[in-house]
Image (tube, helix red, strand yellow):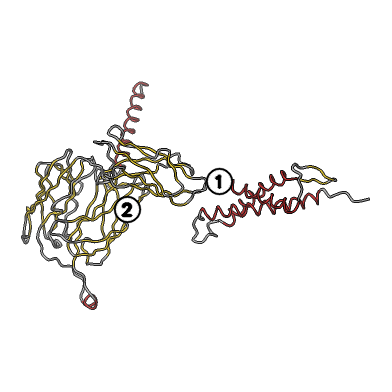
Amino acid sequence: MHPKATRRATTAFLLGLAVLMGTRSAQAAPGRLKLTIDKTTLRVGEDARLRVGFLDRDYRPVANDRERTIYFETRSAGPAETGSGDIAPREATVATAGAASSGFRATRQGRLLIRATSDGLAPAQELVTVVAGRSGLLEILVPAVHAWADDTFAIYPKDHLPVPVNGSSTALFTVTVGRRVEKNEVVRVRIATRPAVPVSYDGRESPGFAEFEIPEGNSNSRQIEISSEKPRLVSVSARIVEARPAALRGDEDVAVVQFVPPRPERVVVRPDQTDASPLWLPLTVELEDSEHTAITALDQAHTIEMSARRGVSFDRRRLQLSPTKPTGHATARFGFFSWGEMQIVATDVENDLGTGSATVTVRIAASMLVLCAGLSGAFGALSRHVHRVRTTRLMPAWDRGRMKLGLVGHTVFGIGFGEVLYQAGRVGLLHPALVPGGGPPEDGTVFALALLLGVLGGFGGVVILDRLTEKILPAPKAA
């Protein structure tokens, strides 16, 4: 093959490979959440497990690409709906390639919505129906069969909370027929918006409408997503276009949603672990909207004050966030012997926004523990020297054919013996197999051990050293 043709073929191959890798990389990034509930119909007092995974922009499952916080909340399905329940925990931190989970307990009969959100990702939502519970002997004798008060066709929520136009948040709706769709039964629904905005259902997006069937064995549709690129009021109508073999009552329903400009709701403080050390920690402070998405354009300035309960100072106590600088940075400084959990709080001085906080775990630096062991060893050696030797000799010297280490020599060797005993104790006594629970020891335990073993090493090491010098360099015998 001609050299120029070979070069062109090679270049085309490399470009194609780069495009393919770039496409795969883009597809691998999460773009939305996927909320899964064990069951969407519960009795009062019954529990369900909530699980959150990640999807790309094309609704394909992908792995989480970084540490994220998932927020769970319950919302009303409508003015006439009284369903309620408790979620615990309401926040979950997801590691890279991980997933989030939480628990839900139904507490009151009716319908409600469970919603999951995370910064920069499209939210997820499910409609849950809570029915009356059974009791005692009846629960044992009669099989549990859930029943609904009616089979009215409806779309929820009726009055959607305002949705910020932030590039990721969407309005989420669910259509229900009030009972399970039986085998060989068809219930086909059409969703239409006014004005026409993008509507997504089961991974398919259409301008202004969507048409789908309620899955067999379910009473609810899958998640219906409606988005808008600008603030506006959108009316959403749901209508049954096909129902066989039997028609359903109330074959049309309407809901509305208001898309609004992003408005700050709360302060967020995030530790930045990059280049962090045990003595200081960079922090990023910003504002987020009601969907936990960071706001990049502010319409007014906000003064944020940093504070902490104990053992923490800041290089900048107050930060000014403005339309030209919506993100602020500060550095938390920890004391030399600070350890354990520290809570950092960021408060809006004008009290217009919710307070943000972050809990960080501070570990004692290994170098600080070594320093403690060395100083403790010096203290142990000095204690032995003052108590036992009782001499004012400072420097090592020969005295009557015997080496006398003096105060300086004892101190230097005490530091060394304290370090050796601490390191030996740390490896032997604090091995995970010997620690209750099998986990790493608490910093307080390690600190106390460094002090104790340092003193013992310095004191005992000097005693042994003196005995060795007497054996190796004995005093001359008297004539």
Residue picked out by circle 2? 91
Judge by depth and name the residue closer to the eye, 48 or 185. 48
Residue at position x 33%, y 45% from top?
347
- The type of residue carrying mark 2 is Glu
Q: What element carries label 2?
A: strand
> What element does badge 1 sit on?
helix
Residue 4 is drawn in which quadrant?
Answer: top left
Q: Which mark is residue 368?
A: 1
Report the mark closest to the observer, 1 or 2: 1
Q: Nearer the viewer, residue 314 or 74?
A: 314
> What crowding class fits label 2: few (fewer than 14 Cα within 10 Å), some (14-19), or many (20 or more)?
some
Above/below status of 217 relative to 288: below
Query: Residue 408 in the image: x percent, y percent?
Result: 71, 43
CA–CA distance in space, label 1 to label 2: 34 Å
Residue at point 62%, 54% (across, down): 453
Instruction: Give left or right: position of 247 versus 121.
Output: left
Name the spot of residue 241 as percent of width and height, x first.
Answer: 6, 52
